[in-house]
Image (cartoon, grey):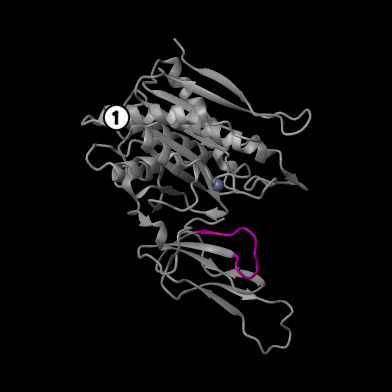
Amino acid sequence: MKTKKTTEHFLPESSIGCQKKIVSISFGPKQCGKKVYIQAGLHADEAPGYLVATMLLEFLEQADTKGDILGEIVVVPVANPIGLSQWSGDTIQGRFDSFDNVNFNRNYPELIEQIGNKIKNRLSASQSENVALIRECTAQILADIEPAGETEFLKHLLLSLAHDADIVLDLHCDHQALLHVYMGTSLWPDASDLSAQIGAPTTLLASDSGGTPFDEANSKLWWVLAEKFPAYPIPSACLAATVELRGVTDTDMKETEQDARNIYSFLQRRGYIAGTAPKLPELLAEATPLEGVDYVTTESTGILAFLKKPGDFVRKGEPIAKLIHPMNISGSGEDVIVTSRTEGILFARCLDRFARPGKIVAKIAGKKILDGKGKKLLTS
Ligand SMILES: [Zn+2]
């Protein structure tokens, strides 16, 4: 018997006559102790995730027909209709809420303190009971929150759909990039099968990226509570990852199908779908700290002529790009050379070619922690 269930979730009206919705599609047995949550398009202008989620839904539907779905799998293929409604000219501006300019993937509710207060006298020596207790308390806290406004409502809704999952995959993409993954430090190396299966040459780890993105809103509470209550067994019970499906224009259908198949195989290997997963590919590279990422930033204006592309290995001090200023006609000035502050793989670079002071034009995954990173490790 098919288990697929589609649920519509309506957001509050944003203005007269304007009400948006998201749709969650679930498969498999509910409340079975195994749950996966996957969403796409939280940054609404990032196209590849929508395609991979849609293709994955096709595969899940086929598996469902055969009765092969063993755990609950929830997919939200379009997570941010607010962002999708924000057209500027002919382009969707889906990264920042036009209302307050806040990134849609930042500032999720931090519930750790409230959860800590609720569980402090109720933890036990049983790891599984502690996991169940923390999820139950999280659900209660979420149910008591009354979000104000459309975006807060959406963030609360997405977190409510995901908070009790063992695996949360948030599908994104960068500008021009390799496939790469962000996740919590405590989740590695247990989660290295995700990076290996999807073929990510870069995995970036942080215990606290400083921005409370969606993945961390689901995962960070586990290791923080484990630190807070060291006498009790509390595992990192949610493998939450932000999966960056290359660049914004990477919508090749062969790659899309491969990405969806890889996520399917990962879930199969983890026991959420019946059948034998293919042999796990070799991990392309060990994870590196998010604190080691060099956000290569320009200090002046000019036209960017890149000397390195995504996938190139660069050394510290090596030129990444030239900045050419078209009005520098005296011939006296030399082109500005933009260099790397670390050694590692250049895994992303910007899409346009116009530099200005303070613009991030490339990202390099270094193994060593860079000085002066501060607490905000993510880009805006
Ligand atoms: Zn994104």
Q: Main secondary structure of the magenta part?
A: loop
Q: Nearer the viewer, residue 278 or 379?
A: 379
From this view, report whether residue 253 is shown above or below residue 316.
Answer: above
Is 355 one of the magenta-colored residues? yes
Q: Is residue 277 visible?
A: no
In this rendering, would 135 be left or right of 248? left
Residue name at image x 39 percent, y 21 percent? 69
Is 295 one of the magenta-colored residues? no
Would you call the spot at circle 1 few (<14 residues within 10 Å), some (14-19), or many (20 or more)?
few
Residue 131 spot, x, y in % from top left: 32, 30
From this view, report whether residue 151 is shown above or below residue 348.
Answer: above
From this view, report whether residue 61 is shown above or below residue 237.
Answer: above
Q: Nearer the viewer, residue 181 or 201?
A: 181
Q: Residue furthest bottom?
A: 332
Which region is colored magenta? 348-359
In this rendering, would 148 be left or right of 241? right
Q: Nearer the viewer, residue 230 or 67?
A: 230
Residue 183 spot, x, y in % from top left: 40, 47
Type of the residue with mark 1: Arg
